[in-house]
Amino acid sequence: MNFHDFNARDIKGQEKALADYAGKLVLVVNTASGCGFTPQYAGLQALQESFPDDLVVLGFPCNQFGGQEPGTEAEIADFCDLSFGVSFPLFSKVDVNGDTADPLFVYLKDATPNDPENAPIKWNFAKFLIGRDGVPIARYLPNVRPEDLEGDIRAALGG
């Protein structure tokens, strides 16, 4: 099993096969509109623009941390577009921890090499870098800025 074996519901409610991203690096991020880390949307968009053919950022809104993503999917999409010009794919709200955790995030926590203990996600804007082959490469804490990932992205791209 790997990342490409999962499906997710996009921000408009349509089922999306994550296998559609095979051949690209993927950066999965649990996001929130009312968080101290929310300005990271700008850095995530910049990463997407810096590697348009090789990387796709996927945003998964989450309301599990301090109720910082209470809006509807439409409100979230509007906020991301108007506030940060986000053009990368956004998905429907998910839980990332606990009994109601989305299976994708259960998998990512379990399969990330630098997090062998399946540790709970600590807050919004945790990041998972997935290889072109669908195998997780690394997990990053919320306070790791998107621009700090450029070296790891370049290394994963082979240069």
Image (cartoon, rainbow, N blue to C red):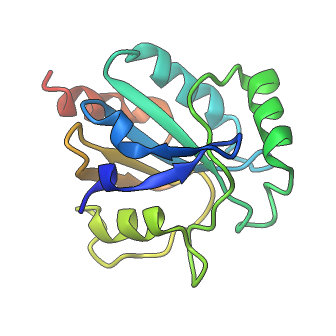
- Residue found at the very far front of the displayed protein: 15
Q: Is residue 24 above or below residue 91?
A: above
Q: Residue sitting at 29 percent across and 62 percent down?
A: 112
Q: Residue furthest bottom?
A: 99
* Residue 156: image location, x then y, percent: 20, 34
Residue 155 higher or lower than 124, as above or below: above
Point out the image quarter for the C terminus.
top left
Q: Quadrant of the N terminus?
A: bottom left
Of 21 and 68, nearer the camera is 21
Q: Residue at x 75, y 24 (%)?
A: 81
Residue 148 screen position, x and y as percent = 41, 34
Residue at the limit of the structure toward the left, as seen here: 158
Q: Is residue 159 left or right of residue 25?
A: left
Please state which of residues 38 and 53 is positioned toward the viewer in this rendering: 53
**Where 49 sits versus 122, above or below?**
above
* Identity of the residue drawn at 61% across and 62% down: 123
The answer to whether residue 143 of the structure is visible from this angle is no
Residue 109 appears in view:
yes
Q: Which of the 4 image quadrants contains residue 2?
A: bottom left
Quadrant in the picture for residue 119? bottom left
Which residue is located at x 43 percent, y 30 percent?
Answer: 56
Residue 130 x %, y %: 31, 45
Please state the total of marks drawn on the protein image: 0
Q: Is residue 76 left or right of residue 37?
A: right
